Amino acid sequence: MTTTQQQTGSQQTALAASARDLVRTYGSGETAVTALAGVDLDVAAGRFTAIMGPSGSGKSTLMHCLAGLDTPTSGSVVVGGVELAGLDDTRLTLFRREHVGFVFQSFNLLPMLTAGQNIVLPLELAGTPVDRVWLDDVVGVLGIEDRMGHRPSELSGGQQQRVAVARALISRPDIVFADEPTGNLDSATSLEVLAFLRRSVRELGQSVVMVTHDADAAAHADEVVVIEDGRVA
């Protein structure tokens, strides 16, 4: 393949998210702390990308900026073709609701709702009808069809995290961010959840970005980005 062909192929690669010269500084003056020091990053669509690095490296700050949960000091973030800096607070909130999914370490399920109710909650809050075919596809891939009527207290940790993954997928977001999704799980259950994240990419066409400090977890991803001292290593 020629250099020109390689460049053309690269340009045609669909991106779920990208960052350019991303800087995030907390505080000012002598006490200022730079969490991100000029990060350039492209996240390919339909891929499982892991962002890893030691504590304090800036990986969680990078995810929060990419997800629109934190505002960069300078630089740009584009998600699903939209420049986040151009959105006010209201439009940013709506954009996250419609285009971004989240999976947290602590599950964040509402205890009074069943698994099924937790999964479709984002759609109900947005006033969007539930696509029953897509719902069946998602819970089928995650293997929780027989747990839809159970409350979180009646589910294992792994089952709760699978419900959280389904909730993140139900609105067909442009990208799903998973923040240490296996941090509260034992090794066997962690492997299950990582396998389900991979299946969501392979079988549902999802784009997933996972932040982790665990090299074994990162090994399940298609691509691994290492952050050190606020930069891509």
Image (tube, rainbow, N blue to C red):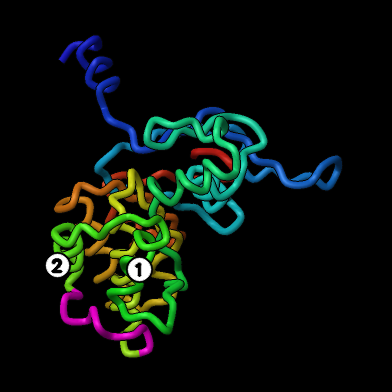
Does 149 lie within the magenta span?
A: yes
Task: Pick the residue in front: 20 or 112.
Answer: 112
Amino acid type at circle 2 is Gly
In the image: residue 192, left or right of residue 110: left
Q: Residue at x 52, y 43 (%)?
A: 92
Is 9 rendered above or below residue 201? above
Is 53 rendered above or below residue 117? above
For mark 2, give the secondary structure: helix
Percent of width and height locating residue 60: 53, 53
**Residue 71: mark:** none
Residues drawn in magenta = 144-153
Percent of width and height locating residue 68: 52, 45
Per the image, the residue denoted by label 1 is: 164
Neighbour tally class for label 2: few under 14, some 14-19, many 20 plus, Cα within 10 Å? few
For mark 1, give the secondary structure: helix
Amino acid type at circle 1 is Ala
Is 43 rendered above or below residue 113? above
Per the image, the residue denoted by label 2 is: 140
Percent of width and height locating residue 61: 57, 49
